[in-house]
Image (tube, rainbow, N blue to C red):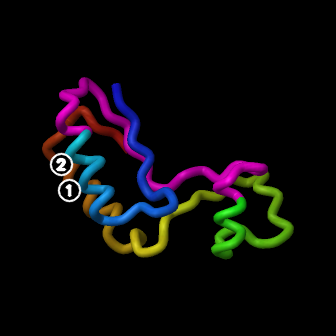
Amino acid sequence: MGFLLLGGPGETRETVQQSLAFADSLQLDMLKLTMGIRIYPGTALEKIARKEGIVAEGDDLLLPRFYLASGLEEWLAPTIRLWMADRLYCTI
């Protein structure tokens, strides 16, 4: 079983395609994909998200917030769904 966390800081179309190609090369029985990464308090990702304005000042992150690298919003989900269409071992 494999897990892909897509959308972290620095993620691009190219890195997503590389990750999907890598997943294909593994011949997995199951693959779990996530689009966006949960932001936890006290992490480096929290600092990045606050700097980028994704997490507002005063937000204690008690309610889940997710980071998705800028520029992925429009195409990531449709790309992943299309890629998964003939890969029955994948889930979102």
Mark 2 surroundings: few (<14), some (14-19) or many (≥20) residues within 10 A: few
Q: Residue type at mark 2?
A: Ala
Of residues 64 and 11, the one nearer the viewer is 11
Q: Position of residue 65 (x, y in %)?
A: 65, 58
Name the image quarter holding residue 72: bottom left
Residue 52 against residue 91 in the figure, above or below? below
**What range is drawn magenta here?**
23-46
CA gap between label 2 and label 1 equals 5 Å
Q: Magenta includes 40? A: yes
Q: Are marks 2 and 1 in contact (CB under 8 Å)?
A: yes
- The residue singled out by tag 2 in the image is 85
Task: Tell me the SS state at disc 1.
Answer: helix
Q: Residue at x 60, y 50 (%)?
A: 38
Of residues 26 and 29, the one nearer the viewer is 26
Q: Residue at x 42, y 52 (%)?
A: 6
Residue 36 against residue 53 in the figure, above or below? above
Mark 1 surroundings: few (<14), some (14-19) or many (≥20) residues within 10 A: few
Of residues 26 and 90, the one nearer the viewer is 26
Task: Tell me the SS state at disc 2.
Answer: loop
Q: Position of residue 54 (x, y in %)?
A: 65, 70
Name the image quarter holding residue 12: bottom left
Q: Residue at x 20, y 56 (%)?
A: 82
Q: Residue type at mark 1?
A: Leu
User: What is the count of numbered marks?
Assistant: 2
- The residue singled out by tag 1 in the image is 82
Q: Is 72 left, or right, of 36 in this rendering?
A: left
Q: Position of residue 23 (x, y in %)?
A: 25, 38
